[in-house]
Image (cartoon, rainbow, N blue to C red):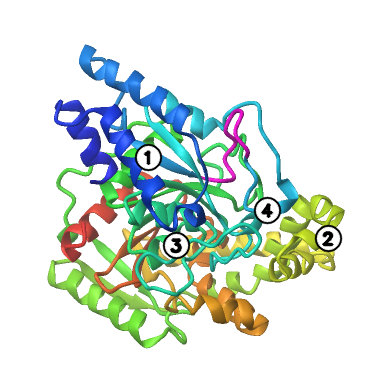
């Protein structure tokens, strides 16, 4: 059951929050890969929160549609009295004194914290490989990378070890693991949801977002995380949509299976009545050329001091990626941001009049995990390709949603306007209905 479905069952008295939580804790304890998925569980907290939710259910005072629903949290969200290490030996033993604001909001909404999930080291890779702490298994394709950096958040949700997972997305870290594990993943607009109490990577690009089983789940979780009213998804219909397929950059060199899955999904949307327009979007290619001068220097400025105190503790591939930001000049960085603001304005003009812009969520299938660890050049190349399409949304300041297409590990991504999450989620509900994947 997904988060919304569990919430309804609790509200109707068909499920007890304590029993639900115990079932998840038992499933985690019994799963052979639990140690590679959860960095640590929080059973005492979970049981206390579940008992409080069960009491509210009996009293008829439930706080919202997700009261009593157990979820997992990526291990970069501070949790009071419990280690938050961001998948890195550099932060081993880091125990915050209070919850991140978004975790506090979830607790106030009655949600149950099951624990903290493994992630890419310091959130700086899209593959999900972490030989320093642990690498979760891909839940859909055995032996393949799980996607990152919110790897454990995705796998815990797909394997039924949480009703949903909360991840973060700086260049694709919600959407890639969601797509590779056949989930819905929402990348929110940078600046919309507070990063208070979140271990930062690139604060100008870092975003909070859910990985879930349905668009409804994502919408309800988004409302909790952003402290807003849930989006009304009633009546969302693909026949009301005007959609743009971006033919610039995003369709180049896409592997056969993801491309076929994307084109088939687009055909199904057209058959459901959506208006499909295919066009070049020049600003996309312009913006993508700025990745190197914007991401790595900010990441190194944020984490470099901690890294250089003990660089030998890091996975060399991630360390190398951080250090690429050391030599970017301040002038190039500032000029890059000046140019990007112009490209964002151009993109808004080029895509005006469309409900969403569609691209394949990822141009590649999940690569072989063992080969990634054995071949550094392969790791670098596959990492850049994995994040290529998702990074469009981050650079252009958009919100974006990935949906399963029905083909394993092949997602369809819909990109919306900045701070247009409410409309994008309605678009997502319509796409989900037309594709029959909800």
Provide the residue designation for mark 4: 88
Q: Position of residue 169 (x, y in %)?
A: 53, 54
Range drawn in magenta = 74-83
| 2 or 4: tag closer to the N-terminus | 4
Query: Which is more N-terminal, label 1 or label 3?
Result: 1
- The residue beneath circle 3 is 177
Which residue, given by chain and number where applicable, does mark 1 sit on?
25
Dominant secondary structure, magenta = loop
* Magenta region includes residue 183: no
Q: Is residue 116 above or below residue 403?
A: above
Q: Quadrant of residue 18?
A: top left
Mark 3 vs 4, N-terminal side: 4
Residues at marks 2 and 4 touching, judged by CB atoms closer than 8 Å: no
Q: Are marks 3 and 1 in contact (CB under 8 Å)?
A: no
First in sequence, mark 1 or 4: give its number. 1
Q: List the residue tagged with mark 2.
A: 330
Identify which residue is drawn at 64% across, 50% down: 204
Q: Is residue 437 above or below residue 116?
A: below
């Amino acid at each position: 059951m997904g988060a919304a479905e569990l919430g309804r069952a609790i509200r109707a008295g068909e499920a007890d929050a304590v029993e639900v939580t115990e079932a998840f804790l038992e499933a985690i304890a019994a799963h052979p890969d639990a140690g590679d998925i959860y960095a640590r569980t929080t059973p005492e907290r979970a049981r206390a929160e579940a008992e409080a939710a069960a009491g509210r259910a009996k009293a008829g005072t439930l706080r919202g549609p997700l009261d009593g629903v157990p979820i997992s949290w990526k291990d970069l969200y501070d949790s009071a009295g419990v280690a938050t290490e961001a998948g890195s030996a550099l932060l081993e033993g880091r125990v915050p004194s209070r919850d991140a604001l978004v975790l506090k909001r979830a607790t106030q909404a009655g949600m149950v914290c099951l624990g903290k999930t493994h992630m890419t080291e310091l959130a700086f890779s899209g593959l999900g490989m972490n030989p320093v702490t642990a690498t979760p298994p891909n839940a859909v394709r055995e032996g393949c990378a799980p996607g990152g950096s919110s790897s454990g958040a995705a796998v815990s949700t797909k394997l039924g070890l949480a009703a949903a997972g909360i991840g973060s997305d700086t260049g694709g870290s919600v959407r890639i693991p969601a797509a590779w594990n056949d989930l819905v993943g929402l990348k929110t607009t940078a600046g919309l949801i507070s990063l208070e109490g979140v271990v930062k990577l690139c604060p100008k690009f870092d975003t909070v977002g859910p990985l879930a089983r349905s668009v409804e789940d994502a919408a309800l979780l988004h409302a909790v995380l952003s402290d807003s009213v849930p989006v009304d998804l009633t009546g969302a219909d693909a026949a009301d949509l005007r959609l743009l397929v971006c033919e610039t950059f995003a369709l180049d060199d896409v592997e056969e299976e993801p491309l076929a899955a994307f084109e088939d999904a687009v055909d199904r949307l057209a058959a459901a009545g959506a208006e499909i327009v295919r066009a070049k979007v020049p600003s996309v290619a312009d913006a993508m050329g700025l990745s190197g001068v914007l991401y790595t220097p900010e990441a190194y400025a944020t984490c470099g001091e901690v890294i250089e105190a003990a660089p030998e503790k890091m996975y060399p591939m991630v360390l190398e990626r951080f250090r690429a930001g050391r030599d970017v000049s301040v002038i190039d960085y500032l000029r890059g941001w000046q140019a990007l603001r112009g490209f964002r304005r151009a993109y808004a003009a080029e895509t005006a009049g469309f409900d969403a812009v569609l691209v394949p969520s990822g141009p590649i299938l999940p690569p072989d995990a063992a080969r990634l660890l054995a071949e550094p050049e392969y790791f670098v190349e596959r990492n850049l390709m994995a994040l290529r399409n998702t990074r469009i949304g981050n650079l252009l300041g958009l919100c974006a949603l990935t949906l399963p297409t029905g083909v394993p590990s092949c997602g369809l991504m819909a990109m919306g306007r900045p701070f247009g999450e409410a409309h994008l989620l309605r678009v997502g509900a319509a796409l989900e209905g037309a594709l029959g994947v909800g």
